[in-house]
Every structure is written in structure tokens, then in C-alpha cells.
Image (tube, grey):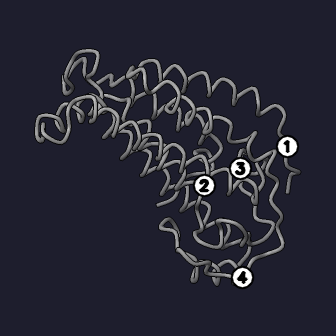
Amino acid sequence: MKATPFEFRLRFVIHVILYVFGFTVPWNKWLPLDPRGPNAHVWGTLAAKLSALNPGTFNILTAFNNLLIVGILFALAAAILRTWAAAYLGSSIVQDPCMHGEGVVAAGPYRHLRNPLYLGILLHTFALALLMPPSGAIFCILAIGFFQLRLIGAEQSFLTAKLGEPYLAYCAKVPSLIPSIKPRVPPSTQHPRWPTAILGEIYMWGVVLSFAILGWRYNATLITKGVLISLGISLIARAFIPTPKPQ
């Protein structure tokens, strides 16, 4: 189960399309699955259910606040993990449409898991799912998760063919998506490049700020607008990231 080269090249566009489907739930026109109203998103639906199940512990405001904190933590964990990974791998490689395999990267988060960038996307998806209608959130989590596995399969096949035994030995020691608390391999010689990593992951940090600053208005639409603005800024920032040399 691996993505085609075409899917890998267009992975950014495919992610955006899947998120758009999650937010817009076009199937509700023919098969209404979600409630209606200003709070008919996962955030509002779960808050209402929590307050109804245990009103002594969760009033509606407390439930909204607790779920918002969960969203902030997911978004923050995703931003930290992806920035940490991009600092060692290189933002230009992270965003390049082609696969790269100059050598095994065993520094930073890559000593704890092989695919920190894809895990970051999964954590990010859980944060955004709070803003989606329930059926859209379920669709998006499943679709994004499946797509990450396909991308991982493609990269693993490419790196195995290109790097051979050193990469297989690395895979045997380091887990794919569930991080090991302790480093599983000695550090390699890569040095972090934090400025370009932060620039490359500016969208992720914009989403964190959107949740953390706008969330206390209890308006999912407002947070979503912050997410879209962050996406626009990130597209501009891409122009300042150097293009990797072709292999």
C-alpha cells in the first residue's frame, strides 16, 4: 500500500482537498448526517454531549473550554513536531515534490520515530476536526490517516531501494509512527536549521495561534478563517525557501 509518484508530487494539494471535503461535507446535500445550527461542529456537538452527560462536572462553557484546550494541544504538538523534523531534514526537502535519499537522517526526532512529519499531519488533523461537522471530521481523520500510510509506504520503498542496508537497519530500530521515548539510534551529523524550519511550518504555527487567540470567542468559523489566513501566508513564505538541488 503505497502512494504513486503522482500522488507524492501533489500531496499538498491532496491534503487541501481532503480538508475541504471535511469542512464542506458535500454529501449532506443528498444524505444529511450532521445536525444544523451555529454549533453543529465537533467542538459544539461534543461540548453539548459532555454537559448533558455530566452536568455537575461539565457545564457547557467548561466543556467548550476543555475541548478548546485539547485542540490547542493537538495543534501545538503538530507544529513542534513538524518544525523539529524540518529543522533536521530541511524545509526545502519537506516541501519538494520529489523524494530525496541522500542518506539516513538519524538526528532530532528521527532518532525517536521515522515519520515525524506524517505524525504531525495526523495530530494537526485531530485539531482541525474539532471545527468540522461530525461526518466531515470522521471522513477527514480516516482519509488523511490512510493517505499518510500510502505516503509512508512510497517513501519507505524509495529509500530502501536507494539506501539499502543502512536504511533497513535504521527501520529495524526506529518505530514508524509511535515515538519511542528514548532515542533508538546514535545521532547523525545533521545540524538543525531553525529559521527555515519555522518559515516552512508557518502554517502550523498560524493554526496554533488561531486556536489559542481566537478560540476564546467560541466561534469555529472565526478560527477557520484564521486557518485559511495561515494557509495563505504559508504559500507566500514558500517563495523564500531555497529549492533543493536535483538528484
Q: Which mark is residue 75?
A: none
- Between 182 and 136, the one nearer to me in the picture: 182
Q: How far, Cα to Cα, is label 3 from label 4? A: 23 Å
Q: Are marks 3 and 4 in contact (CB under 8 Å)?
A: no
What residue is pinned by disc 2? Answer: 81
Q: Quadrant of residue 35?
A: top left
Residue 219: image x %, image y %?
A: 39, 20
| Amino acid marked by disc 2 | Leu
Q: Earlier in the sequence, mark 4 or mark 1?
A: 4
Residue 150: image x %, image y %?
A: 50, 55
Say which of marks 2 and 1 sits in front.
Answer: 2
Residue at the spot 26% in from the left edge and 23% down from the top edge: 40
Residue at the spot 53% in from the left edge and 27% down from the top edge: 213
Q: Are marks 3 and 2 in contact (CB under 8 Å)?
A: no
> What is the quadrant of the C terminus in the image?
bottom right
Question: For numbered disc 2, what is the local secondary structure?
Answer: helix
Task: Check disc 3: other Cα within 10 Å, few if <14, some if 14-19, many if 20+.
Answer: many
What residue is pinned by disc 3? Answer: 94
Q: Earlier in the sequence, mark 2 or mark 4?
A: 2
Q: Earlier in the sequence, mark 2 or mark 1?
A: 2
Say which of marks 3 and 2 sits in front.
Answer: 2
What residue is pinned by disc 1? Answer: 243
Q: How far, Cα to Cα, is label 4 from label 1? A: 29 Å
Task: Check disc 1: other Cα within 10 Å, few if <14, some if 14-19, many if 20+.
Answer: few
| Amino acid marked by disc 4 | Pro
Q: How far, Cα to Cα, is label 2 from label 1? A: 22 Å
